[in-house]
Amino acid sequence: MNENPIDVLDGFEPETDYQYASMGARFANYLIDFAGFCVLHALFVLAYFWYSGQPFVMPYPYLWLVVLLPTGWTAWFYFCGYCAMLEGLTSGRSLGKLVTGTVALKEDGTGITFKEALLRGLCRAIPFEPLSALGGSLWHDKFTRTVVAKK
C-alpha cells in the first residue's frame, strides 16, 4: 500500500504567497489617488487659463473648490482613466498604492498587464462601484480577477 497518495490537483492551484491589503489600506489608496487626481486637475485648469490668455479671476473664495475639486460624471470617468493609466504604466501601482505599500496583482500572484489595468479602470466607472466594498470585494477586483496585496 502506497503511503504517499498522489494529489491530482498538485500543480493546478496557483501559488498565492501574498497577503491581502486591508480595507483600511484600500480606502487610504482611494483617498491618496483622489487627492493626486485633484492636484492634476487643478494644474490642468490653471494651465488652460494661462495658455488661453483668459483672466483668471475668482470673485468668490469658494470658486477655488471648482478648480481643486472636480465634480460630475465626467470627472469620475477621468478619475477612472487616471487610475487605469497609473496602474498600467507602473505594473499595478498607483500613487496611493506606492504610499501604502500595496500592489494590484492577478489572483495567481503575478503582476497585472496594461490590459488588466485598463479593465480595472473601466470597472471603476460602473455607477455605485465603490459601494461594492460593503460586500467585501470590490467589483473592479472581482470582474478582472485581480487582488490588491501588501508588497
Image (spheres, grey):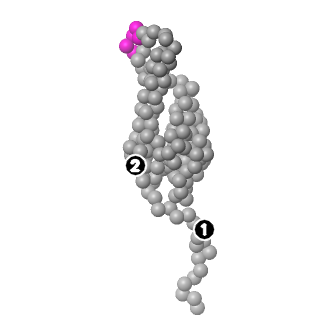
The type of residue carrying mark 1 is Phe
For the residues marked 2 and 1, what is the alpha-carbon distance in whole angstroms?
A: 29 Å
Which residue is painted at 60% across and 68% down in the image? 12
Which residue is painted at 55% across and 40% down in the image? 84
Q: Nearer the viewer, residue 129 or 115?
A: 115
Other residues around mark 1 within 10 Å, as few (<14) / some (14–19) / many (≥20): few
Which residue is painted at 47% across and 42% down in the image? 94
Precedes in sequence: disc 2 or disc 1 = 1
User: Residue 122 at x, y = what percent?
Assistant: 60, 38
User: Residue 88 at x, y = what percent?
Assistant: 54, 44
Other residues around mark 2 within 10 Å, as few (<14) / some (14–19) / many (≥20): some
Which residue is painted at 53% across and 43% down in the image? 89
User: Residue 114 at x, y = what percent?
Assistant: 58, 46
Tell me if I can see residue 134 in this picture: no
Residue 91 shows which numbered tag? none
- SS for callout 2: loop
Q: Nearer the viewer, residue 46 or 60?
A: 46
Question: Quick one: which residue is furthest to the bottom in this view?
Answer: 1
Inspect the magenta stretch and tell me whether residue 60 lies in it: yes
Per the image, the residue denoted by label 1 is 12
- In the image, is residue 150 above or below residue 8? above
- SS for callout 1: loop
Q: Nearer the viewer, residue 6 or 51?
A: 51
Residue 101 shows which numbered tag? 2
- In the image, is residue 102 above or below residue 17? above
Q: Nearer the viewer, residue 123 or 94?
A: 94
The type of residue carrying mark 2 is Gly
Q: Main secondary structure of the magenta part?
A: loop
Query: Bounds of the magenta span?
Result: 58-62
Q: How many marks?
A: 2
Inspect the magenta stretch and tell me whether residue 28 lies in it: no
Tell me if I can see residue 144 in this picture: yes
